[in-house]
Amino acid sequence: MSGKDSVAAGHGRDDRLLKEEIHDPYVARSKPKEPAICSECGAAFHKGRWQWATPPAGELNELMCPACERIRDNMPAGILTLSGGFLGKHRDAILKLIHNKVEEEKLEHPMKRLMSVEDGPEGELVVKFTDLHLPRGTGEAIERAYDGNLDIQYTKESNLVRVYWNRDD
């Protein structure tokens, strides 16, 4: 029996009201006019994506890229919070790992950036990112290198990922 037959037989369609998705305000609804360049960081929007490339010669559409907008507005897409006694003893090495991971990602993806590294009120380290995926990747790199406990929480409503890493010893 096909799907059409079941509706005809009186089984109904199970229609439901779908909740409208809340979209990330930092992701443009339409692509910028090409070629474009970010007035803050110099990233070029060319061939449908942001990249670290020299845009073609000619008139450039100057605008601010989504990563620079997030930095300006202090609105991270992801937050990595590190805590525990192990952090205090190995802070410099962990920070170096974070910076290396960010630089590695940023080479290919200009929108994946570190916004800030701050000390929290209880000795934790709070790291803010312009991208949803970079906090997870960075947290996983720290977990692979130093063990500990990693917890990842996505908040769909606010387009934010929170990643927590802790190691007490």
Image (tube, rainbow, N blue to C red):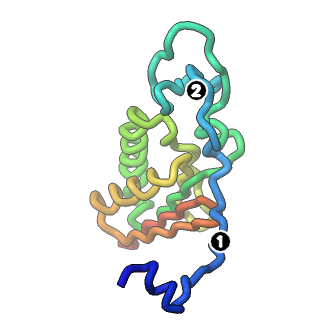
- Residue 86, given in percent of the width and then of the height, sits at 38, 65
Q: What residue type is labelled 2?
A: Cys
Task: Name the residue nearer the viewer: 139 or 95.
Answer: 139
Dot 1 corresponds to which residue?
19
Q: Which residue is drawn at 39% across and 32% down?
A: 107
Q: Which of 13 and 75 is in front in this view?
A: 13
**Which residue shows up at 53% across the image and 27% down it?**
45
Residue 140, placed above or below residue 112: below
The image quarter containing residue 100 is: top left
Badge 1 crowding class, 10 Å Cα cut-off, few under 14, some 14 to 19, many 20 or more, is few
Q: Nearer the viewer, residue 7 or 134?
A: 7
Q: Is the C-beta separation of discs 2 and 1 under 8 Å?
A: no
Q: In this view, does 156 lie above or below 29?
A: below
Considering only vertical position in the picture, is 8 above or below 117?
A: below
Q: What secondary structure is found at the residue carrying circle 1?
A: loop
Which marked residue is nearer to the observer: mark 2 or mark 1?
A: 1
Q: Classify residue 78 by image quadrant.
A: bottom right
Residue located 53% across and 92% down the image: 10
Amino acid type of the residue tagged 1 in the rendering: Lys
Callout 2 secondary element: loop
**Dot placed on the residue nearer the N-terminal end, 2 or 1:** 1
The structure residue drawn at horizontal position 63% and vertical position 73%, both measured from the top left corner, is 18
Q: Name the residue under label 2.
A: 41
25 and 83: which one is in front? 25
Find residue 123 and report its horizontal and vertical position in percent. 55, 63
Q: Which quarter of the figure is the C terminus placed in?
A: bottom left
Task: Report the residue that reaches farthest toward the top.
Answer: 58
Q: What separation in Å lies between label 2 and label 1 (alpha carbons)?
A: 37 Å
